[in-house]
Image: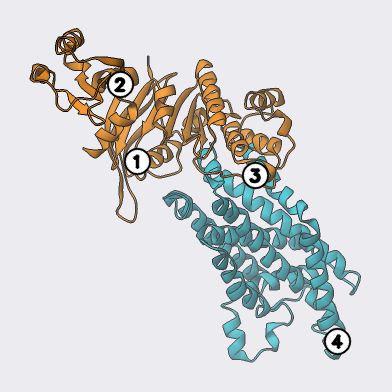
Amino acid sequence: MNWRAVVAIFTYEMKRFFRTLFQSLISPVISTVLYFIVFGAAIGSRITQIDGVSYGAFIVPGLIMLSILTQSISNASFGIYFPKFSGTIYEYLSAPVSALEMVLGFVGAAAAKSILIGLVILATSAFFVPVVILHPFWMILFLLLTAITFSLFGFIIGLWADGFEKLQIIPLLVITPLTFLGGSFYSIHVLPEFWQNVSLFNPVVYLISGFRWSFYEISDVSLSVSLGMTFVFLCICLTAVAWIFRTGYRLKS
Amino acid sequence: MTSIIQIQNLSKTYNTGFHALKDISLDIKRGEIFALLGPNGAGKTTLISVICGIVNKSSGAVLVDGHDNVTDFRATRKMIGLVPQELHLSFFETVWDTIKFSRKLFGKPDDDAYLEKILQQLSLLDKKHSKIGTLSGGMKRRVLIAKALSHEPTVLFLDEPTAGVDVELRKDMWNVVRGLRDNGVTIILTTHYIEEAEEMADRVGVISKGAMILVEDKTALMKKMGQKKLTLTLEKPLVALPKKLAKFNLQLLNNGSEISYAYDVSKGKPDIAGLLADVQAAKIGYSDIHTAQNSLEDIFMGLVKQ
C-alpha cells in the first residue's frame, strides 16, 4: 500500500475544505437554523409529538442525514471531478497509486468533511431542541456508513460527469427529492398505505430510519433492515467504483 | 547501452475506432535523450500516455527496466516522471505545496533539501511560496518539470516541453534537460521544434499516422540522409549555364546570379574541385562560395510526406 499517497490525497482534499471554511461550515449551520425556524418553530409548534418525541427533536436526525447525504455527494464528486476538469488527473493516473488508494484518499476526505458538518449540525440543533442520543455507537455507525456510502456515490458521479451540469443533476434531481421524501421531516407511517409502500423503494428511508432509531428508539423500519440496506448500498457503490477503475471508464481512454 | 524501456508491438485503438498506435516496437536506451518527432495527431502523446499508464493499450507490451507497466505498475511508475504538454496545475496552490504533494503521491518520504535543489536548478527557488496562478507561462512549465522530478525518476517524459516558451527560456530548458541527462536520467521528449531535437537528441524517432517510420541515431541520420548544397555567388549574372558544366547537374538561381550544386554525401565524395576548375575554365567569376546541409526538419518533412 502507498499510504503516503493516501495521506497526501486526503490532506490535499481536507485543505481545500478548510480553505473555504466559511462556506463549508457556516452555510449548513445557517440552513439548519432556517429549518428549525420554519419546521420547528412555525410549523412544528402546530404538530403534536411523534412517538413521544417533540417535532423539533424528531427532525434532527433527518436534518443531519440531509446534510450528510448532500455534502458527501458534493464533496466527493467535486473532489474527483476537479482534477479531471483541470487536467491534473494525469498525475494521479501516472503515479504508483492503486484504485483502492485513490478511493481511500478522495472518499475518506469527502466522508470526513460531511461527518464534520453533521456533527456541527448536531451541535447547532442542541441550541434549539433537547437532543438525546440513546445509542451513540449505532449513531456513529450509521453516520460513518452513510457518509462513506454516499461519498462513494458522489465519487462515481464525479467520475461519470463530463461537465458541471452533470455534476449537479443527480444531487438536485435525485438525491434531494429522495431525502425530502425519505422521512427527514416526517415518519412514513403518516402516509397513506400506498405511499408507505412506495417509500420503501427509497433507500434514504432506511438510512434515516436507522439513524433516528439510534437517537430516540423510534423507526419506520427495523434496525436490522436499515443496517442491511445500508450495507447493500455500500456494496453496490463499491462494486461500481471497482468496475470503473478496472475498465478505466471516464478515467482512461 | 542497455534498454530502459522496451515497447513491443504496441497498438492502441480508441473507442471511436481511431487507430492511434499501430504495432509500435521501440527500445529506449538507458541515459539517452530520445526525441519523438511527428506531426499533430501522429500518436506521440498517445504513446507517452500508454507508457505512463494514463491511456490503456489495446495490445502489445511496455516494459520499464524489465517491469511490465500494467502488471507491475508500481515499479514502473516510480521510475517515470511526466511533464505533460498542457499546463495542468492547481492554480490556487503554492509551488512548494504542489511539488511536495507530487513527491508524496509517488510514495517518497519528505526530502526538503532535494526539492529545494530542484527548484534552484529550475530557477524557481524565489517563487517557492508563490501561488501557481500568479506565475508566468514559462514558470508554470518549470513547475511541471519540478513536479515530474520531485520523486527522483530515472526516466523523464517531456511532452512538448518548450511549446509556447520564448527562445531564451527554451535554451534554459535545454540546459536543464542536458543537466538531467548528465545525472543519468533517460529523457524522452516529443517536440514540434526540429531544432530542439537537432540540438539535444541522441536518437530520433519519427512517428506518422500511428506508425514508427524511423528510429535512428541523430548524427547518423543526418549524415545518411542529409543532402548538401554548394552555392556560388557569381560576379556577373549568367543567361544560361555553359554546356561544359552540364555533367554536374547544376541549377542557375536568382536571375542567373547564383549557381547551385546539390550532392548527396551518402553516394560518394562530390567532385567539388572538378566543378570549381571547370567554372574557372569557363571563365565564370564568383565572389562567394558557401555550403549548406539539409536540416532535420527537411529530413522529417520528407519522411512524413512519404
- Foreground: A40 or B269? B269
Q: Residues within 10 Å of mark 4 (few under 14, many from 20)?
A: few
Residue at image point 36% right, 22% down: B203
Residue A136 visible from this viewpoint? no
- Residue A119, position in %: x, y? 80, 61
Q: Amino acid at mark 4?
A: Ala
| Chain letter of the cyan region | A
Q: Nearer the viewer, mark 2 or mark 4?
A: 2
Q: What is the C-alpha distance between the residues marked 2 and 1?
A: 22 Å
Q: Residues within 10 Å of mark 3 (few under 14, many from 20)?
A: many
Q: Residues within 10 Å of mark 1 (few under 14, many from 20)?
A: some
Side (left or right) of B154 relative to B250: right
Q: For the residues tagged 3 and 1, is the chain the same?
A: no
Q: Which residue is mark 3?
A: A9
Residue A146 lies in quadrant = bottom right
Q: Amino acid at mark 2?
A: Gln
Q: Chain of mark 1?
A: B
Q: Chain of mark 2?
A: B
Q: Amino acid at mark 3?
A: Ile
Q: Colour of chain B?
A: orange
* Picture quarter with the N terminus of chain B: top left
- Foreground: A4 or B202? B202
> Mark on residue A64?
none
Q: What is the C-alpha distance between the residues marked 2 and 4?
A: 89 Å
Side (left or right) of B113 relative to A154: right
Q: Nearer the viewer, mark 4 or mark 1?
A: 1
Q: Which residue is mark 2?
A: B293
Mark 2 vs mark 1: which is more N-terminal?
1
Q: Which residue is mark 4?
A: A42
Q: For the residues tagged 3 and 4, is the chain the same?
A: yes
Mark 3 vs mark 4: which is more N-terminal?
3
Q: Which residue is mark 1?
A: B39
